[in-house]
Image: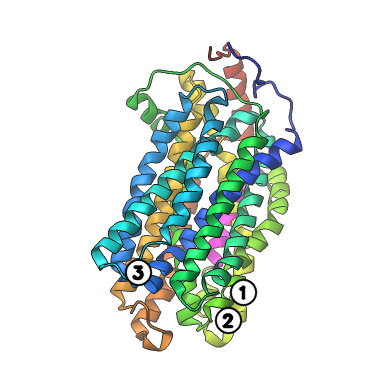
Amino acid sequence: MDLTEPDASIVPAPLPFRIKFGWAVGELAIAGYIGLTMAFMLYFCTEALKIPPAIAGIALLLPRLIDAFFDPVMGAVSDRTRSSYGRRRIYLLVGSILLGVSFGAIFFVPPDLPLGPRVALVMTIFLLSNLSVSIFEVPYSAMLAEMTADYGERTVLTGYKMMAARIGIILTALVGPLIFRSTPDLNDGFRLLGVIAGVFMALTGLWSFFATRHAPRLVHSAQRFSVRDEVSAVLMNRPFRTLWTTFLMQNLAIGAAATALIYFLVYNLRLDPKAAGPFLAAGGFAATLATPVWWFVAKRFGKRPTYFLSLGLAAVMTIPAMLIQAPMVGLLLVVLLVSGAVDASNQLMPNAMIPDTVEVDQARSGVRREGALFGAWGFCRKLGMTAGAFLVSLALAAFGFVQGAGPDAQSSEALFGIRAIYTGVPLGLWLVAIAFLTRYDLTEAKFNALKAKILERPNTFES
């Protein structure tokens, strides 16, 4: 019987800084992957590999959908894993290495292959990279609910994670265009980006693995796997369901806007791709500075009211971009800075609230299933961003966008389509997200009552 690791339910808050910081570094790998794939993957396919946008959209959609369904499976697997590294950390080791290698390989797809094999190879390697990030991310995220059971400390720990996420987004947004535009041939530039990014993801993931060696964790006896039980952990958990649907609408909005932004800058505002970095990084920079402010607001007013506020502000901030024209490109930078500051809360709040729903399931079932819940949570984020990105590819095709051509070659209908998918669609989705959040009712008082109920039961350790 291994009782060497402390039980997170009795470890006093706050966690040591070295554990918070070391664990959060792993988010850099995830953020680098998300930032590069959302902002540049469709652009790479249409502009470097010359794949028509509708076909490129499908080529990127199918691997993401398969991977999204893999997330809950990965969560269930990590719930039941036994190793000398613990049930989660072993996947930080394996996943970070697989992610670095598979992501870099995407950009080595030969552009002169016939269209069919070219698309098939993109899909295959992209699927491998998506599965690799799931192997890393789902157990990594589930560690949050294990390392502390304190309501407020979870917000702080999530804040560290979100700070790292923003730094990762800033780095990819600033450096990405500089790297892939640093060579005369766009494909060579993307290959260089793949190598650098792959090494970065592997190293930051490994950092988190080694830094969390002594992190607190709850160690429970493995439960028999049951699809019915795994599904019930989600469907019977009303606070989780509510957050899930809210977060899905949010990620649909983010996925559409993030994918369309590079097109909006280059084609609508006629910005050189090399100069796009500051615009792509502006939101991440503002969010990094704003995250501590949102910590304070959430501590003072609560997570749910703070989330409501930031969702409303996000909806409002889509409106100015509907009117911005090429001579007003500087105004867009201001809009992106404000939107980024708002988005800091829209990432911090739901990710700080979702660990609390683990106790809802445990109080009902007597079983801790962090992996199952965080797997479904990862599925939500990926499904939303994937579908949002796919909407962009459909809009580009529907409005007659010409891949590989400059702004002057695009029709007014194509330019309208880019603007609509960047502004109008996210606006509607933000409003729907607000409507869903009205049903969330897990307060701090209810959460503490659930913990008291759980503590009446003895902890069970794996042997």
**Whole-percent x, y for residue 297 in the image:** 70, 49
Please give the label number shown on residue 329. 2
Main SS, magenta residues = helix
**Disc 3 to disc 1, how far (Cα)?**
34 Å
Measured along the vertical axis of the image, is residue 4 above or below residue 414? Answer: above
Residue 347 seen: no
**Whole-percent x, y for residue 1 in the image:** 58, 10
> Of the residues tagged 3 and 1, which is closer to the observer?
3
Q: How is the image coloured?
A: rainbow
- Contact, mark 1 vs mark 2 (Cβ under 8 Å): yes
* SS assignment at label 2: helix
Mark 3: amino acid = Pro
What range is drawn magenta here?
304-317
| Residue under the point 49% across and 18% down | 366
Measured along the vertical axis of the image, is residue 245 above or below residue 228? Answer: below
Mark 3 highlights which residue?
A: 111
Please give the label number shown on residue 333. 1
In the shown orientation, is residue 65 left or right of residue 89? left
Please give the label number shown on residue 413. none
Kindly indicate the quadrant of the structure image that contains residue 255.
bottom left
Is residue 310 a member of the stretch shown in magenta? Answer: yes
| Residue under the point 47% across and 21% down | 364
**Disc 1 to disc 2, how far (Cα)?**
7 Å
Is residue 332 a member of the stretch shown in magenta? Answer: no
**Whole-percent x, y for residue 89 in the image:** 56, 32
